[in-house]
Amino acid sequence: MSTSNKTNRILVLGSTGKTGSRVFNRLTKDGWTVRAGSRGAAIPFDWDNEATWPAALQDIDSVYVAYVPDLAVPEAVPAITAFTKAAAKSGVKKLVLLSGRGEPEAQQCEQIVMNTNFNWTIIRASWFCQNFSEGYLADPIAAGHVALPVPNVREPFIDIDDIAEIAIAALTTDNHTNTLYEVTGPRMLTFKEAIAEIARATGKPIQYQHISMDEYAALMDEYNVPKVYTSLLTYLFTEILDGRNAHVTDGVEKALGRKATDFSTYIQKAIAGGVWG
């Protein structure tokens, strides 16, 4: 294995998010020189404020790039364009980009990174398992009632522990340079089927209800969810979940030499962590 030495200085953007926190915490535990990239970090990084970028990028060799809220939003393309220029100016050598399957804007961002002189790795991921336990679905599942506007389409949910493991390997070794991994879980489930698996594993009755997008947006407003996230979910639920991603890939196995984590294994980890009460 070709391994970088631990003088490699790494910036993890989205270091308080689902994937970024895992990448940051494990790199820190393993003794790498790592800088948190978030608004509340010691050296703040804010995607909406380019003035924060140079200080965060100073003396950095490699960057894990997780764009907030998602590469699917229109603002992502100009932001990634500007960020790659700032990173190049700062002397960054490697970018590891988290992307999304079937999202045209995300694929534009991938091309921006590929067309640079960086050593790059792209992790193009399916819908996260952890959205059921760490995101917008955790509270409804714990309450026993999940209402969603999603079609009856199957999705190969990916465990983000797998994503983090690939990102860390790409950041700390030279084995994944200029490679795109499209990663999914090993089998497909509808959201209704996923909720049913969680119900069986927890022994809790969880009602699943299909509602319209308008009803869902009104529900988000009731819970004071920011408009940008409501808009993003509307796009993902109505456009991306149209069957275009209803197939599994072997990206995790190519990157890590093992099978992707199954949804049932993810559920057991979540239960062991005290999720869903």
Image: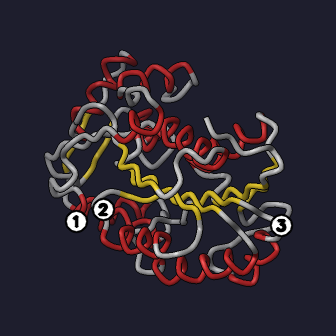
Question: Could you tell whether 108 is left or right of 42 in the image?
Answer: left
Q: Give the CA separation, mark 2 to mark 3.
A: 37 Å
Going by the numbered disc 3, the residue's amino acid type is Asp
Screen quadrant of the N terminus: top right
Query: Which element is circle 3 on?
Result: loop
Q: Residue at x 54, y 19 (%)?
A: 272
Q: Is residue 103 above or below residue 257?
A: below
Q: Are marks 2 and 3 in contact (CB under 8 Å)?
A: no
Q: Give the CA separation, mark 1 to mark 3.
A: 40 Å
Q: Residue at x 16, y 47 (%)?
A: 153
Q: Is residue 54 above or below residue 42?
A: below
Quadrant assignment, res 111: bottom left
* Label 1 sits on residue: 239
Q: Is disc 3 surrounded by few (<14), some (14 to 19) or many (20+) residues within 10 Å?
A: some
Q: Is residue 240 above or below residue 170?
A: below
- Residue 63: x and y, percent? 66, 60
- Residue 211: x and y, percent? 20, 53
First in sequence: mark 2 or mark 3?
Answer: 3
* Label 3 sits on residue: 59
Q: Give the CA separation, mark 1 to mark 2.
A: 6 Å
Question: Could you tell whether 251 is left or right of 193 in the image?
Answer: right
First in sequence: mark 1 or mark 3?
Answer: 3
Quadrant assignment, res 22: top right
Q: Is residue 161 above or below residue 196?
A: below
Q: Are marks 1 and 2 in contact (CB under 8 Å)?
A: yes
Q: From the viewer's perspective, is the residue at label 2 or at label 3 nearer?
A: 3
Query: Which element is circle 2 on?
Result: helix
Going by the numbered disc 1, the residue's amino acid type is Glu
Query: Which element is circle 1 on?
Result: helix
* Label 2 sits on residue: 236
Q: Residue at x 52, y 29 (%)?
A: 275
